[in-house]
Image: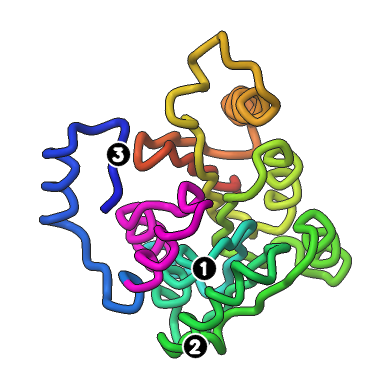
Amino acid sequence: MFKNWLLDQEIYNYVLAVSLHENEILRQLREETEQLQESAMLIPPEEGQFIAFLIQLIGAKKTLEIGVFTGYSTLWTALALPPDGRAIACDRNAQWTAIAQRYWKQAGVNHKIDLRLGEALQTLDNLLENSQAETFDFIFIDADKENDLEYFEKALQLARPGGLIAIDNALWSGLVVDSTVQDPETRAIRTLNQKLYSDERIQLSLLPIADGLTLARKKE
């Protein structure tokens, strides 16, 4: 089971015990992913449930995910979408997304998911070139951090007015406040956080959930 660096383990276990509703297929996918060397890339279950909650809260029918990994967050998304909902999912790793597709099919939601393999920035450009600007209700960004600012700018073009953009890892295990840490990913997250704070195109909230989740609502 996951640990949360922001919470005492006993409190975190209690949060999961009284709030998490993770179905069997989601649990199996999470547990298989936890066996991978790259398992730290997996979002925790309470974050997946929160994303699903947001999708249903805003009545989203069309979503975009930048960074799929093994498809755990995508599965939460697809399960939350209505029968006619559609999720475009961007990743470049065929091995990880093969795991994802197996579970999407098992859950009976693969028809809702359009997997786009390739460089995400190119995929986003293709969407913009194909008249998809301002058509997405919800966009989740959880990919390579050095490109987060570019992902956000393109996501803002793709989101409808009033649409919601969620960005993972905003707190980066606390490293964003450690001035001795100056690697490219950490600097990129700090830069994005500062730019979003002063961005008048959005309404902003950074939540201390999981590893920090930024919510940016595109102003109407």
The residue identified by callout 3 is 4
Q: Give the range drawn in magenta.
A: 28-56
- Disc number at residue 102? none
Q: Residue at x 33, y 61 (%)?
A: 49
Asked whether 8 or 123 is in front, the reply is: 8
Asked whether 194 or 108 is in front, the reply is: 108
The residue most toward the right is 129
Q: Which residue is drawn at 43% across and 30% down?
A: 173
Q: Assess disc 3: are there few (<14), some (14-19) or many (≥20) residues with their C-alpha within 10 Å of its C-alpha.
A: some
Q: Residue at x 40, y 58 (%)?
A: 34
State if disc 3 and disc 1 touch (CB < 8 Å).
Answer: no
The residue identified by callout 2 is 105
Q: Which colour scheme is used?
A: rainbow
Residue type, numbered disc 3: Asn
User: Secondary structure of the magenta portion, mostly?
Assistant: helix
- The image position of residue 58, as x and y in percent, is 43, 63
- The image position of residue 8, as x and y in percent, is 18, 32
Q: Which residue is drawn at 43% across and 52% down?
A: 43
The residue identified by callout 1 is 71
Residue type, numbered disc 1: Gly
- Mark 2–mark 1 Cα distance, whole angstroms, equals 11 Å
- Disc 3 is placed on an element classified as loop
